[in-house]
Image: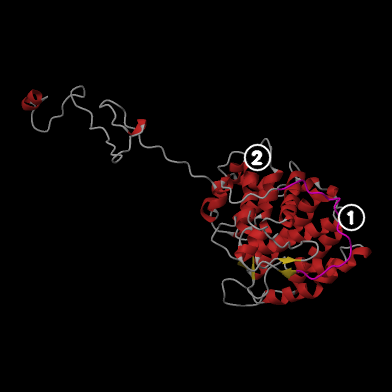
Amino acid sequence: MDELATKMPRGARAPDDVLMPPPPPRFHPGPGVAPQADQRTAAPWALRMPAPRRRQESPAEVCTTSIETEDFDFSKVVSGDGFVVPTKRILSEGDVSTFLGSSTCRDYVSFINFLCSKVVGVKITDVEETPESLRPVVEALSTLSRYVDEVPPQEHTLRYGNPAFRDWHNLVSENSERLVSAVLPDHLKASAKELAYYFGDSFGNRTRIDYGTGHETNFLVFLYCLAKLGVVKEGDSAALVLTVFNAYLGVMRKIQQTYGLEPAGSRGCWGLDDYQILPFVFGSAQLINHKLIKPKSIHNSDFVQAFSKDFLYFGCVEYVLRVKRGGIRETSPMLNDISAVPRWQKVNNGMLKMYEGEVLSKFPIMQHLGFGTLFKWEEPQPRGPPL
């Protein structure tokens, strides 16, 4: 090599078969530590490959909490007496842990899981007729929608929070018990005061003029209480999601756009569309085992428009695209990340875990939830003396 270098003109390059490969990478594990097989000095002719990058898990694959559940039993009906106005019982982080370990929490999550199982493969348009027991709930939601028409937004200079929302919310508070009473049969009218607490708190906070997943949870607790009273039967499950909850979602979107509600506790786009999470839970369940639609299909505008009326998930995506400027990748990075998950079953599992971890496990949200005779608070069991 030295002899060849002396005969070559300055700046010339030696033939490839003469050049030596670059020095191999070296590993210094430190005293007393043996290098691993892939960390030892490679042979001079070995191909140097970059270190593999660890795949970043999407939010739908991250398990934040796990609540053991059983099949929800619609036959376990609560007796119709002793109803109370719910009170707040979660006053500390320790109370959150108490709630997560309670049979009430397990039963509530079982209720959500059961509803998910009943909408798999079912389109919104497949529910042709609303069950008679659920019609009063839909009528109550229609009444609240009419209240929005009666209370127009006021002129103001703030980005969020039209003051007219407070007037609208006053109407809701004044009429909640009456509207809920119309949902109940005569022998359960006494429970109206308890259910009205959850119903009235399902549409945002009057003082802060905001709305978020805690208010959404109140509405589902309201539906859970109807199931515990026996008003909602097992056969009503699909309609409960695709008719009643979907009607609630429509009312909330109308309220959000009319009064410019602040996203409650929003951390940017973590909440998928800033306000809701449960329609993504139920919507992903609808699409499990669908042969044509995949999670990545949300990037196809034709798919979004074609299926937004049939599937809650695509209805949510259509709403995001309609009210926000820009594509999903810019406005909702979490939805974009989730679209890379290959199967809807995995998306649904992740959405349930996200709800458990980002809503049911968060003190700032759960501190506002009330507990009564239907959605019960359970005191932690005292520990026995040490052995």
Q: Main secondary structure of the magenta part?
A: loop
Q: Is residue 25 left or right of residue 168?
A: left
Rounded to the nearest whole Å, what is the CA distance between mark 1 and mark 2? 33 Å
In the image, the segment drawn in magenta is 69-86
- At x 72%, y 49%, the residue is 309
Residue pushed farthest right? 186
From where the camera sits, is residue 308 visible? no
On the image, numbered disc 1 is attached to which residue?
A: 132
On the image, numbered disc 2 is attached to which residue?
A: 293
Q: Is residue 366 above or below residue 351?
A: below
User: In the image shown, does 364 or 210 lie closer to the viewer?
Assistant: 364
Q: Quadrant of residue 320?
A: bottom right
Which is nearer the N-term, disc 1 or disc 2?
Answer: 1
Q: Is residue 265 above or below residue 309?
A: below
Q: Where is residue 153 shown, x and y percent of the image?
A: 67, 74
User: In the image shown, does 257 or 135 lie closer to the viewer?
Assistant: 135
User: In the image shown, does 381 or 57 lie closer to the viewer?
Assistant: 381
Q: Is residue 383 magenta?
A: no
Q: Where is residue 378 shown, x and y percent of the image?
A: 73, 61
**Given this view, does label 1 or label 2 mark the residue nearer the observer?**
1
Instruction: Tell me if mark 1 has few (under 14), some (14-19) or many (20+) residues whose alpha carbon lies within 10 angstroms of its own.
Output: few
- At x 75%, y 44%, the residue is 117
Q: Contact, CB < 8 Å: mark 1 with mark 2? A: no
